[in-house]
Image: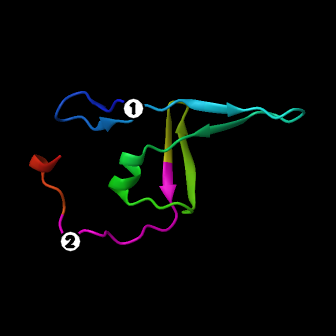
Amino acid sequence: MKIKSRNKNMPTTYPVKVQAMRSQGKPPRFYVSFPLALAAAIGLEAGETVQWELLDRGELHMVRLETPPPTTRRRAGKSQL
């Protein structure tokens, strides 16, 4: 997967494709994978409960219901990104 950054002031993007699972006699189900690099950056763990917030037709936010405390002692500086 390619990770691209538009410029230094814009966030890094993580393009993913929506996948459809079709079972005989059932409506399709849609799946979106979560990029490992992004999961690691926010400390997302397998089994966490999240919910989706629909802001408009072009913007969907994932909200963590319980955010664990950070595992690092300091924040990344701009030169480290």
Residue linked to disc 2: 73
Q: Is residue 38 above or below residue 48?
A: above
* Image-based side of 64 in relation to 75, left or right: right
Q: Quadrant of the N terminus?
A: top left
Quarter of the image where one finds residue 77? bottom left
Residue 71 on the magenta span: yes
| Rendered residue at 57%/61% (across/down) | 49
Residue segment shown in magenta: 62-74
Instruction: Report which residue position mark 1 lands on.
Output: 1
Residue 13 in the image: x percent, y percent? 34, 34
Where residue 66 appears, x then y in whole percent?
Answer: 49, 68
Left or right position of 55 against 36: right
SS for tag 2? Answer: loop
Taking the spot 9% from the left edge, 47% from the top edge, the residue there is: 79
Task: Locate residue 53 relative to residue 13 in the image: left or right.
Answer: right
Q: Residue furthest right?
A: 25
Q: Amino acid at mark 2?
A: Arg
